[in-house]
Structure formats: structure tokens, C-alpha cells
Image (cartoon, helix red, strand yellow):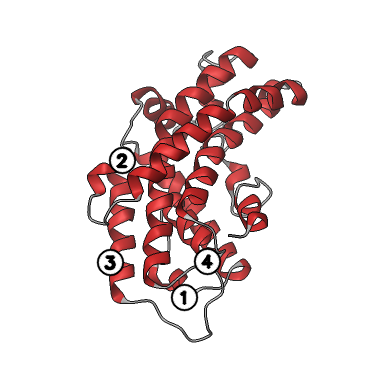
Amino acid sequence: MSLTALLALADSRLPAGGHAHSGGVEQAISAGLVTDPVSLAGFLRRRVGTAGSVAAGLAAAACAVVGRAVGGGAVAAGAAVPPSVAAALADLDAEADARTPSPAQRAASRQQGRGLLRVGRRAWPHPAWDALPTQPHHAVALGVAAAAAGARPADAAAAAAYLSMSGPATAAQRLLALDPITVAAVTARLSPLVDEVAGAAARAAAGPFGGLDLLPASADPLLDLLAELHVSRKDRFFAS
């Protein structure tokens, strides 16, 4: 496993477009639901346990699909992936659609997935990139990126769960002009929850492929509603 690659995948500075998305926190702030570090912590906890859990399961499953079929990390030039890999990744992409009721959130996920696909091809060359659709869901692309970088499914789950928290936290810091140290403390205190969610998602993805119903499927109607309200705004700072 490449620890450095895992850190890169979870780094908001990776130019995959994540910096343009707030994960719903911009609309939550506008609605008065997030106003300070305490309410931000509640929002992040809620998001990690739902959207973060779903993303972690999908990322771990995608990483496992590639790892079982081709292997992770560097692969010989000209190598190809079996057709079954493309089919399995397409199934996971469809599962991401089914687990994301909000059209706005689905669009945001695919925007970020397309960005990660573009970066991943350059950063971690691997034949599995060709098995993805041109605009995959972010979690599925993240799983392929993790496999291409030589990481494990559990690492992919950890990166996905962490990103579900770090992106909105940074956005809230900017929108509310919060003290960066305070926000860092909020996210640090949520680390055990991120670990717990990632671990459960990785275990769910570890079974024989085909048991897609075992992957996390937690939903949050409030986050869906916030996303739909946000996409219709003309004065928004973030894309989602």
C-alpha cells in the first residue's frame, strides 16, 4: 500500500474539483441550520453517517473489483482489464445512482468523478480507468484511483469517508469566517466516527461481489432537500 498516495487522494488540494463543492453546507448555512462550530459538528456527523457511509462502501467495492481482477499499483504497459470489470463498475455506478435520491447530488457526484478520472489517469496510470464511464460517480472513481495507486479497499473507504467531512468543513470555515483552528478541532473530534463508518463500509464491501445490497444505503432527506434548494439558487458560492 502507498500511504503517500492515500494521503494525496484525501487531500482537498487534489485538482479534481472538490474545492468547488460544499457538500450541502452552503445551503444549510443559508437555512440557519449551521451557524457555529457546534452546529457544524452536528451537520458533519450527520453527513458522514449517511452520504459518507454510502461513498465509503462504493469506493471500497470499486477498489476491490479492480484489485481482484487486475491488481493494484503499477501494471505493465498495454495491459487490459477483463470485460467483467467494466460491467462490475457499471453496476456500482448504478448503485450510486440508486443510493443518491437527489438529482442535484447525483450531478455533483458525477462532476467530481469526471474531475478525478482526469487527474487519476495522469497521476496513477492503470488500465482500469478505461473501464469507467466518461462521467462516473465520484465514489466509484475514487475506488479505482485507490486501486491504481496500490491502496486497499479499506483505504478507499477511509478516503471517501474523510472527504465527506473535510470538504463541507472547509466550505463552512470560508462561508462563516470560522477560526481555522476551531474547525480543525471539530474535524479531529469526529475522526473516530470517520474510522467507524469507513471500517463498517469496508467490511460490507469485502464479501463476494454481487451482494450489492450489503453496501451501505443510508439516506438523509434533509441533505437531499438542501441540495435541491441549492441548485436552483443564482447567488450560490459553491457548485453544490
Residue that label 1 marks: 127
State the image coordinates of residue 201 (x, y, percent, origin top left): 39, 41
- Judging by the rendered image, the residue that carries numbered circle 3 is 87
Return the mark for residue 99: 2
Looking at the image, can residue 133 be seen?
no
**Residue type highlighted by circle 2:** Arg
Looking at the image, which is closer to me, 78 or 158?
Answer: 158
Mark 3 nearby-residue class (10 Å; few <14, some 14–19, many ≥20): few
First in sequence, mark 4 or 2: give its number: 2
Of the two numbered discs 1 and 4 on the same chain, state the one appearing first in sequence: 1
Q: Secondary structure at mark 3?
A: helix
Q: Residue type at mark 1?
A: Pro
Q: Residues within 10 Å of mark 2 (few under 14, many from 20)?
A: some
Mark 4 Cα-neighbour bin, 10 Å: few <14, some 14–19, many ≥20 = many
Residue at figure coordinates x 33%, y 30% from the top left? 219
Report the amino acid beneath label 4: Ala
Residue bearing the label numbered 4: 148
Looking at the image, residue 184 lies above or below residue 156: above
Along the polypeptide, which appears first: circle 1 or circle 3? 3
Mark 1–mark 4 CB contact (< 8 Å): no
Label 1, label 3: how far apart the Cα atoms are: 15 Å
CA distance separating discs 4 and 3: 18 Å
Q: State the image quarter where residue 82 is shown.
A: bottom left
SS state under label 1: helix
Residue 124, position in %: x, y?
59, 68
